[in-house]
């Protein structure tokens, strides 16, 4: 976690450092890393609601009034954090939430975004997914109501991606964050990898193939052994870290959420799969399905070279 030196906290409704878990976590991280902290809030322009105020106040005046109010509220939080020897600034933007947050990331060179999960839409709301899809730096979405400290952390990687430089780099980033967060929180760390035999169902049920159960079993053994070797090689690069390895046969869409539920995981570190150089193509079917199925805080990271479609 020491890599994060320029942290952006999305404040939204609650700007109290004692009760907003995103601010609280960011403050601890900033203090330990001697990092810069920026509190950002986005005021939505009242384009649809302004008709109700016709004759009382203009849209621009109402927006400015809201901006002024939020500045006052954030200034109090900023002062409290500065008393704790944290270098912190504030920014109020107007527009659409996730767009302005990503623009601030790009303009301010932030290396981590922290926010509380969207409470109005369940664990992860639309703004959360937009950030996880389009923000160029890691995004830490903190589930409200969880204990401030992580107790059980899950790092999940795709072993098939070990065949490519981009994939190895993404897996390494997931492991770096998982191991450093576990040390930082003095938490229990698990490394999970799911594997499948490509075309297994077709081999078993094809009307045109006659593959024996013995041959399929041998192929499964070979595939499991190959994935075990990849897992051991990956884990071997982190000999100084303590974690439990898990190699599970099955679809990660269901395997990851099931593991999270059965093992009481409270924070998941995972990659949002995509291809660098294709702006906006980030969360694949697997990652999105997993994120919609888990009830935890998450840290999502992206492949090296990813370019945000937001400018």
Image (tube, rainbow, N blue to C red):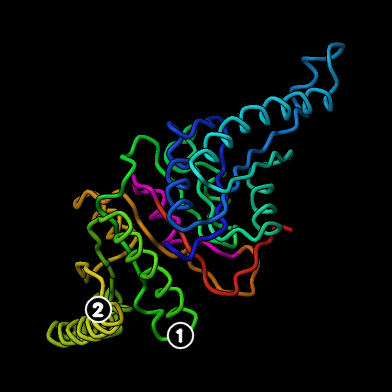
Which mark lies nearer to you, 1 or 2? 2
282 inside magenta stretch: yes
Q: Which residue is mark 2?
A: 239
Of marks 1 and 2, which one's residue comes earlier in the chain?
1
Task: Report the side of 188 relative to 76 (left or right).
Answer: left
Q: Nearer the viewer, residue 13 or 274?
A: 13
How many angstroms separate mark 1 from mark 2 (CA)? 22 Å
Q: Nearer the viewer, residue 289 or 102?
A: 102
Residue 138: percent from left, percent from top: 51, 60
Q: Which residue is mark 1?
A: 164
227 inside magenta stretch: no
CA neighbours of label 1 inside 10 A, class few (<14), some (14 to 19), many (20+): few
| Residue at image location 32% in from the left, 79% down from the top | 198
Q: Secondary structure at mark 1?
A: loop
Which portion, as a residue range, is magenta?
281-297
Q: Quadrant of residue 159?
A: bottom left
């Amino acid at each position: 976690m020491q890599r994060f030196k320029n942290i952006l906290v999305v404040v939204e409704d609650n700007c109290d450092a004692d009760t907003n878990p995103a601010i609280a976590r960011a403050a601890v991280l900033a203090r330990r890393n001697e990092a810069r902290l920026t509190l950002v809030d986005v005021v939505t322009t009242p384009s649809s609601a302004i008709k109700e105020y016709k004759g009382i106040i203009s849209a621009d005046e109402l927006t400015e009034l809201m901006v002024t109010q939020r500045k006052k509220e954030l200034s109090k939080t900023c002062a409290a954090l500065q008393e704790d020897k944290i270098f912190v600034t504030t920014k109020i933007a107007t527009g659409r939430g996730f767009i302005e947050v990503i623009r601030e990331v790009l303009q301010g060179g932030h290396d981590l975004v922290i926010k509380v999960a969207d409470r109005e839409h369940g664990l992860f709301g639309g703004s959360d997914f937009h950030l996880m899809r389009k923000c160029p730096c890691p995004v830490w979405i903190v589930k409200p109501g969880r204990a401030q400290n992580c107790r059980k952390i899950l790092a999940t990687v795709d072993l098939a991606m070990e065949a490519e430089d981009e994939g190895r780099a993404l897996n390494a980033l997931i492991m770096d964050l998982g191991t450093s967060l576990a040390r930082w929180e003095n938490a229990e760390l698990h490394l999970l990898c799911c594997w499948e035999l490509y075309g297994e169902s077709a081999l078993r049920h094809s009307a045109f193939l006659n593959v024996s159960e013995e041959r399929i079993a041998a192929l499964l053994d070979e595939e499991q052994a190959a994935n075990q070797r990849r897992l051991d090689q990956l884990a071997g690069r982190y000999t100084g870290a303590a974690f439990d390895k898990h190699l599970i046969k099955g679809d990660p869409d269901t395997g990851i959420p099931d593991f999270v539920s059965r093992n009481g995981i409270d924070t998941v570190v995972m990659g949002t799969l995509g291809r660098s150089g294709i702006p906006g193509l980030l969360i694949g079917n697997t990652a999105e399905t997993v994120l919609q199925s888990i009830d935890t805080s998450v840290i999502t990271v992206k492949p090296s070279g990813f370019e945000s479609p937001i400018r």
